[in-house]
Amino acid sequence: MMKKIDLVLLVEDDPITNYINCRLINKVGAASEIQVALNGHDALTMIKERIQNNECCPDLIFLDINMPVMDGFEFLERFRRLDFPNKEKVVIVMLTTSTHMKDMDKLGSFGNSELISKPLNQEKLLAVTSKYFNHTGFSKIA
């Protein structure tokens, strides 16, 4: 049995997308815990609270670009300013319908990051988990 990713954070303003992504991650068995934030502001608040409580921060963040309150890029800018152990190991995957080169360029400046077109599916999820977490043995969904 492969070791699961401790915590995956979904940052997405669409509840249906969050539901589908949670089910996918659970079916594949990729994470011990999944948390959901409906915008970048809520995600930052959640991460800051985990830091203050000495709880583990997300290992993997799936981040939507276009959200109300605080979009994905503003989240990235503020996340960059946070200070906590192993921050450089956090993998951020932007899920987007955008193929704008400026979005790709902006994302390129953030270490462990990927841009994946929506929707997230099993193939894309397994590609990310095997690339960054050496997880290749999750259950494949028939």
Image (cartoon, helix red, strand yellow):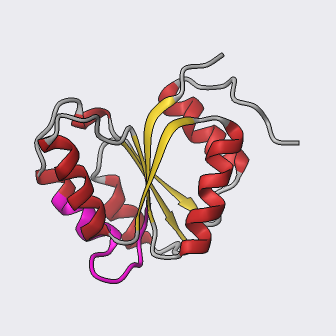
**Image spot of residue 130 (x, y percent):** 59, 30
Q: Quadrant of the C terminus?
A: top right
| Residue extending farthest right | 142
Spot occupied by residue 36 in the image (x, y as percentages of width and height): 44, 59
Across and down, in percent, residue 49 comes to 18, 50
Left or right: where does residue 112 sit relative to residue 95? Answer: left
Number of numbered discs on residues: 0
Pick the front one: 15 or 100: 15
Q: Is residue 90 above or below residue 133?
A: below
Looking at the image, is 121 positioned above or below residue 39? above
Classify residue 14 as left or right of residue 70. right
**Looking at the image, which residue is at 65% across and 65% down?**
119
Farthest-out residue, bottom: 68
In the displayed orientation, state which residue is furthest to the top.
1
The stretch drawn in magenta includes residue 79: no
Left or right: where 30 falls relative to 63 = right
Q: Nearer the viewer, residue 97 or 70?
A: 70
Residue found farthest to the front: 53
In screen coordinates, is 108 left or right of 75?
right
Q: Residue at x 19, y 62 (%)?
A: 77
Q: What's the magenta region? A: 62-78
Q: Residue at x 79, y 36 (%)?
A: 140
List x then y, in percent, for residue 33. 47, 40
Q: Is residue 70 magenta?
A: yes
Q: Nearer the viewer, residue 114 or 29?
A: 29
Q: Residue at x 49, y 28 (%)?
A: 133
Of residues 36 and 128, the one nearer the viewer is 36
Quadrant occupied by the N terminus: top right
Q: Quadrant of residue 112?
A: top left
